[in-house]
Image (cartoon, rainbow, N blue to C red):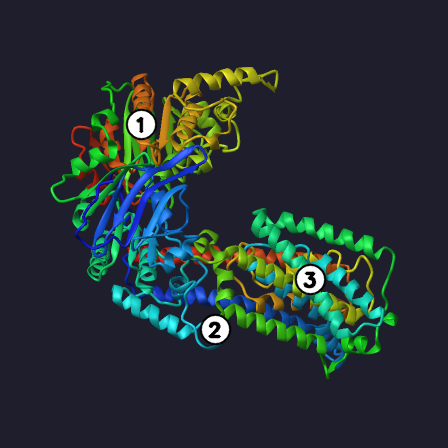
Amino acid sequence: MTHPSDTGPAPVLALKGISKSFGAVRALRDVSLELFPGEVHALAGENGAGKSTLIKTLAGVHRPDAGQVLLDGGPVVFHGPGDARDAGIAVIYQEPTLFPDLSIAENIFMGRRPRRSLRRIDHKATRDATTALMKRLGVELDPDRPARGLSIADQQIVEIAKALSFDARVLIMDEPTAALTNSEVTRLFGVVRALRDQGAAVLFISHRLEEIFEICRRVTTLRDGAWIASEPLDGMTEDDLVRRMVGRDLAELYPKQDVTPGEVALSVRRLTREGVFTDVSFDVRRGEIVGLAGLVGAGRTEVARAVFGIDRRDAGEVEVDGRSLPNGAPSAAMAAGLALVPEDRRAQGLVMDMSIERNIGLTGLGATVKAGLMDRGAERSRSLDWAVRLRVKYARIADTVNTLSGGNQQKVVLAKWLATRPKVLIVDEPTRGIDVGTKAEVHRLLSQLAADGVAVLMISSDLPEILGMADRVLVMHEGRLTAEIPRTDATEETVMAAATGRTAA
Amino acid sequence: MTVLSPDPAPVAEAPKAGATRLVDRVFKMRELAILAVFLVMTAVTQAGNSEFLSEQGVKDLLLNATILVLVATGQALVVITRNVDLSVGSTLGISAFAAGLYLQDGGSPVVAVALAVLLGIGFGLLNGLLVSLGQVPALVVTLGTLYIIRGVDSIWVGSRQITAADLPGGFVDFGSGGVSAVPYLALIALAVLVATAYYLRHFGGGRELYALGSNPEAARLAGIPVRKRILAAYTFCGALAGLAGAMYLARFGNVDSGTGSGYELTVVSAVVVGGVVFTGGSGSVYGAALGALLLTSINSVLPALGVSSVWVLAINGVLLVLAIAVDRIVALRVATALKKRNARHA
């Protein structure tokens, strides 16, 4: 740990040599961090670098295995989130944590309501204070409205109002801008600057590097749970920061092989699911990786689900190798050579309590049955084969998958589907939440598959991944395909423009 | 790394007030709807049988509802926290017998009631500890304690029985007496109900029960003492089941090892019919009490109309399914309405 300054003000909150493990996974290793009053500090790192664990340690949710949390220079132990809050630490999580059944006012003041005689809640004071907070934030939200059904931006506002309501000295924001529009981000930054000028320390996490440079003064970078650097942002470039986060050159992370696309393997024509997506048509050829980009909620996952037949389509055709697929029949899609690696591997891709062997075996139940009974030997050798090919790191193949790290779980999901030898592979957010090393391996694997003639449709919110891996980029905006951009023309700007609907298709 | 972001509705928007009113109305509607059904049913029955709303008729109706209202109030608290207590019937039975045994030996009625309540608190604590510390689904844990308590009860009581003749006359008179048509027991239940509702509305602990049922993870992050609250809800529920046991004894004077058997299902039905959502976070004890009133009045209405009482169970079941269906449909309607409103401003 560098010592940032011996002359300036003392850090209001600091972490010293924090380590935290979950089972076999070491989420944080000897991490240190200092937050100074009147400063916005960025926390940078790839998905899975340990940012969330660090935040939860500051918030009193996790207790570190080793190391100290220092408040105003003195060691403290937070026994729970309440302790951290009482110390003046407010956390705004990536997923807003509201109570849908309670009113906005109650959400803001939960646990610290204004009281009147006999410790009763002063409902009027609660409501008035909420109205005042909303005025301060420049928004009109009815304090009595239940939180259910609020847009993400409004939920975010309620979370910020919560932090304001107890004059937090430390404000931790985990990707607060991920779901906001530009004008909402501007407003949010106004609030953050005002808080900073009042002497609050802000820890800011964002995947948008330009935002980090816009509002933060210093940055601490984490990689694979380890502290990499804490330094002023002044004089750094975005490339410098990315190098810190990734720890290697980008070319290495996106090992895309050039291929000549073959015949059309997957053809989607005028696919429509009412109220979800409309008139979506595209082809994926053998050997091609087609990226499907768009904002969260643009309908990408839904298109994939309808193509595979998990959801029924209201109109349109899906063809694999020229043969039309029946509507709403995943088993027919599988038989035709389609494979779908879903976004949420824990909930949809894996049976967490089952062994690696049996998880991979799930898609091959037809192939490993002898005289109506499971051939366990065949299942094992098939699973072992794929686990080795994908370099899954495990102790024994009979271990349950919940003992594996996120990256290795993702490899098991991939193995499970690759074992069906698909002609068309649809991957939805294939590298979300996995470490950089595994990410590169997954990319190498996808590239290899394409080179072997598999048609790959890759849905991703990770723009560098789309740009680095895709031969062609399809962009969706509000349920429609708005652009098809060849590799040579695809840049962050062109994709973002189409994704936000700034250009017509 | 860059993450693409959606483009949700702008924040400041006036027509939100419409959504607020809509949601508000839906939730207040529930209690009113039950009340309306109850009143219509009563009116129809009265039209068919003028004896139904006589002083004695009203008194019987209230007496029958009282015990269920009491237990449903406690159960509602537990259900609001996204849990359930299936052991209330067993707790009621064993507390009633304990109180009866004490009175039989010449004990004072006040101490007997206290004894029943304390016994209920004990079992409530046991349930609460198992659920909050064991992190096991409440349905399974309390199913277990249901059988354990009933088993202990059976061994202890054996073939013994307590009858009204064994009890002090004053105690039994109190159980059936009242101020004109309103029984004393109903007044006690009403007091408990109003106090509970007031606590839930006006005290931090009460609101936190809703909060942790609404979103347990957020409750933890907000620093709510989740375990303590769940423990408190179960303890209160157990206490009311114990009190209900004492009332049962006063009302019927007749207790054996099977008393209260199967009662938990009626209680849970009353709570759900009353609009306390099984997934936690929403509903009121008044709703639960109205649900209890509705279910017990069906018991009185059918005989008064000359319909065989064998229909009671089936009708209760229909009401239950209807209530859940209504909840679901309303929830979906509200969700689409809110979505449309949000979309319109996008």
Question: Which picture quadrant has residue A311?
Answer: top left
* Disc 3 residue crowd, few under 14, some 14–19, many 20+, Cα 10 Å: many
* Disc 2 residue crowd, few under 14, some 14–19, many 20+, Cα 10 Å: some
Q: Which three-letter amino acid code belongs to the residue tagged 2?
A: Arg
Label 2: which residue?
A: A120
Tell me the CA gap for discs 2 and 1.
55 Å
Instruction: Say if residue B273 shows up in the picture.
Output: no
Q: Which mark is residue A437?
A: 1
Q: Chain under label 3?
A: B
Label 3: which residue?
A: B120
What residue do we see at 46% from left, 60% from top?
A101
**Mark 2 or mark 1: whose residue is earlier in sequence:** 2
What residue do we see at 46% from left, 38% from top?
A347
Q: Which three-letter amino acid code belongs to the residue tagged 3?
A: Gly
Tell me the CA gap for discs 3 and 1.
58 Å
Q: Quadrant of the N terminus of chain B?
A: top left
